Image (tube, rainbow, N blue to C red):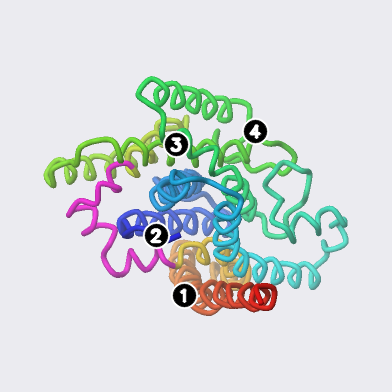
Amino acid sequence: MAERREIRPLTGFRGVAALVVVTYHFFLAMGGTAPLPFDRGYLAVDAFFVLSGYVLAYNYDATFRAGADIAKYGEFLFRRFVRLYPAYIVLVSLGVVKLAIKPGLGDFTAWDTFCNLFMLTGWGLHAKPVVGLSWSVSAEIFCYAAFPLVLMLGRLKTVGTCAALLGLAVLIVAISKVGGGISGPMDVVSDVTVFPLLRALAGFSIGVILCGLAARRSAFSSSIADLGTLLACLAVIAAATFDHSDLVTYLCIVGAVFWLAADSPLSNALFANGPVYRLGEISYSLYLIHPLVFSAFGRPMLALQPVIGAKTTLAIAYVVCVGATILLASLSYRFIEIGGKRALMQLRQSVLKPASR
């Protein structure tokens, strides 16, 4: 399963989305509300889902189009598992340690333990997650399991594509209306309903369809792609600032993914430069680690408010917390994500070798 040339602006965009989530959660952790345009930061999680669908369709459509079988499907799932599980299980373990120190561990049942261990807490199975935001990682696993079926959406003709997009749009509107969003219509994260799972699957499916559309269209000129990228990015910022329905912002995020995938000079300058691209590389660990960092460093710094004032305290705490998160995420990416993936691949190889003799 050889992957194609990476679309670097999409990786960088994922990094920016992760930083938006981190910023949004920082202000919540400090007892306040994130400033505009970050107060809708939970929608950056939907960007993850759309990006995931696009990138996987881009890399694996040819593999499954050549003939899907159990072996290919199993290899695909294993590759996705070893990509996510090492960092996930380490952060869940740290979460367990934190709960063991503070009251709360006794609230977890055997079912909760099972679902946390096997990444099922985002499937609407009434399982309490140890790490609250791990629901999205769990939902990603479901999307991976459904990938060969979802991939068919990217191969539809014009009428079928329009029908699929219309159906997904109706689903997203329905989720925003009845899903019970916490901080906004699309902030749907409950562990007792399937709405978070549907939220993930909808975004993932849209990403797959976008990739199918991109594969069938003629290549944009650099100037057109640059213009589309610029307008899409400005639209995301404007929508995140003024849109209270979440739906316009969601649509703008989808548009941004579409234009960034064109891989234009401007998209590379904005999102494939060294620092932003690096954020994309470590975005998964960045996403998982930041709540623990905020708990350890951010909240204790609130004690400085009477001395240096609230605004100065927030500014210092933000720099310290985000800096520490990026540093720890970089270490996690190198030693846990890459190291864990390598170890699991070697473990599988050592298990299969004796069996093949």
Dot 1 or dot 3: first in sequence order is 3
Amino acid type shown at disc 3: Ile
Cα distance between the residues tagged 2 and 3? 21 Å
Q: Which mark is residue 330?
A: 1
Mark 2: give few (<14), some (14-19) or many (20+) Cα within 10 Å. few
Q: Residue at x 57, y 67 (%)?
A: 289
Look at the numbered discs 2 and 4 and tell me whether their residues touch, using CB distance below 8 Å. Answer: no
Residue where numbered disc 2 is placed:
3
Q: In the image, is residue 199 part of the stretch drawn in magenta?
A: no
Look at the numbered discs 3 and 4 and tell me whether their residues touch, using CB distance below 8 Å. Answer: no
Q: Which mark is residue 206?
A: 3
- Quadrant where the N terminus sits is bottom left
Q: Position of residue 68 (x, y in %)?
A: 53, 46
Q: Nearer the viewer, residue 208 or 307?
A: 208
For discs 1 and 2, the disc positioned in front in the rendered view: 2
Dot 1 or dot 2: first in sequence order is 2
Q: Is residue 278 left or right of residue 100?
A: left
Dot 1 or dot 4: first in sequence order is 4
Amino acid type shown at disc 4: Gly
Amino acid type shown at disc 1: Ser
